[in-house]
Amino acid sequence: MLAGNWKMHKTIAEGKQFINEFLPLVTNETTKDIVLCPTFTSLHVLSNELKGTNVELGAQNVFWEEKGAYTGEISPVMLKDVGCNWVIIGHSERRTVLAENDLTINRKLKAALDTELIPIFCVGETLQERENNRALEVVKEQLTNGLKDLDIKQNGIVIAYEPVWAIGTGINASCTDAQEMIGYIREYLGKIFNEDFAKTIRILYGGSVKPENIAEFMNKEDIDGALVGGASLTPDTFADIVRFDKNV
């Protein structure tokens, strides 16, 4: 699975231009889930652009209520209505810049699953937490609190491990670092849920993923895809990531 997170980039016109250039480059990639997550303002238009293609639509955030007096928020029902199948929840920028916590993230995950949106649930440690040897502890706490009381039989949650210190910094986690943490995540999920769930859940890596390093990460046993930030903003670059060859 390859998911592009555009963050706060691209107008509607720029998004349409991206789609027109990107789709012909990935039309033959039928064995991978390809997801684009643009800004809220572009969702409706890009939903129409992606209909009938092999690229699906996701949102970058969601609120936990279906409707109500929540100025500025977007409900899961609204995301489904506009054509989204996926939604990113708990991204590190939401946690660090916008003060989201495990409690609100847990509520968002429940709301998404109840509305048959597939969450891409993000976890990951900061550089200070890693340097203080707290990386495993931090990710374990995020998983425990974020997934609390979730019905794991509901449709298809995906987890994305994103070391905060490797997002947009130019500093890359090594593929060994990524495999170590994602292997730990899978092992821990086996303990709090069950082994079958842990074996089948998809776990992505996110952190300065590029065409030059994607195959290296994807060759690791427990890594099932990537959540791509900056490199997803350019059609040919993201297409090169999507078209990676494990044999290279």
Image (spheres, rainbow, N blue to C red):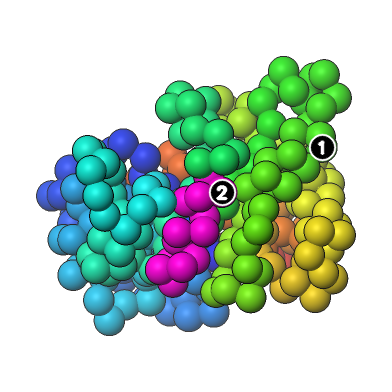
Q: Position of residue 142 (x, y in %)?
A: 68, 41
In the image, what residue occupies the spot 48% across and 80% down?
30
Q: Please tell me whether mark 1 sits on a helix, a strand or a loop.
A: helix
* Mark 2 crowdedness (10 Å alpha carbons): few <14, some 14-19, many ≥20: many
Q: Quadrant of residue 54?
A: bottom left
Magenta residues, dominant SS class: helix
Q: Which residue is disc 2 drawn over?
A: 106
In the image, what residue occupies the spot 74% across and 23% down?
129
Q: Is residue 111 visible?
A: yes
Tag 2: amino acid? Asn
Of the numbered discs 2 and 1, the one sitting upstream in the chain is: 2
Q: Quadrant of the C terminus?
A: bottom right
Q: Is the residue 54 above or below the residue 35 in the image?
A: below
Q: Please tell me whether mark 2 sits on a helix, a strand or a loop.
A: helix
Q: Position of residue 184 (x, y in %)?
A: 84, 50
Q: Is the residue 70 above or below the residue 198 in the image?
A: above
Q: Between residues 245 and 193, which one lies in front from this camera angle?
A: 193
Query: In the shown orientation, is residue 69 left or right of residue 145?
Result: left
Q: Are marks 2 and 1 in contact (CB under 8 Å)?
A: no
Instruction: Please say whether residue 111 is one of the residues in the magenta stretch.
Output: yes
Query: In the shown orientation, is residue 137 left or right of residue 80?
Result: right
Q: Position of residue 16 (x, y in %)?
A: 18, 57
Q: Which residue is disc 1 drawn over?
A: 136
Disc assigned to residue 91:
none
Q: Position of residue 141 (x, y in %)?
A: 74, 39
Residue stretch in magenta: 105-118
Q: Is residue 208 visible?
A: no
Instruction: Please say whether residue 63 is one of the residues in the magenta stretch.
Output: no
Tag 1: amino acid? Leu
